[in-house]
Amino acid sequence: MSKETIATNHAPQAIGTYSQAVKAGQTIYLSGQIPLVPETMQLIEGEISVQITRVFENLKAVAEAAGGGLSDVVKLNVFLTDLSDFPIVNEIMARYFEQPYPARAAVGVAALPKGAQVEMDAIMVLNPQEYPL
């Protein structure tokens, strides 16, 4: 099975030795996204809801660059520096996903890159009938 890197200017560029996403067969592994504004590579300013929305927009851009969308996400990992923000994640996630929702984990962490309060990564699988090998 070959692997292909996915890149888009509509999401923050990788700031280390990783790719925005890697496609292996019909599975795409999306790297963690923090609330960076793609055009400036700076953290978006505002409350946690603004940061969470920016993260979903970044994931959406990478998913679309890979030939799919958030509806193709089968697993979502959410990392928060304050787990009391989790209800806000649920509220905003409902704007980006419909049932059946992806499997999900929420993890409380001490710190995230660049002082972000939220980071998310995902795994998506493209429909083989729509996207043949």
Image (tube, helix red, strand yellow):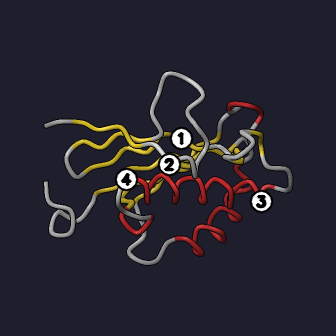
Q: Residues within 10 Å of mark 4 (few under 14, many from 20)?
A: many
Regarding residue 33, the answer to whether it shows in the image is: yes
Q: Which amino acid does label 1 sit on?
A: Gly
Q: Which amino acid does label 2 sit on?
A: Asn
Q: Residues within 10 Å of mark 2 (few under 14, many from 20)?
A: some
How far separated are the C-alphas under marks 2 and 1? 9 Å
Quadrant in the picture for residue 51: bottom right
- Name the residue carrying label 3: 50
- In this view, 84 is above or below 108: below
Q: Which residue lies furthest to the right in this view?
A: 46
- Mark 4, secondary structure of its residue: loop
Q: Which amino acid does label 3 sit on?
A: Val
How far separated are the C-alphas under marks 4 and 2? 19 Å
Residue 121 locus on image (x, y percent): 50, 46
For image coordinates 50% across by 47% down, the residue present is: 8
Q: Mark 4 vs mark 2: which is more N-terminal? A: 4
- Name the residue carrying label 2: 77
- Name the residue carrying label 1: 32
Q: Residue furthest top?
A: 17
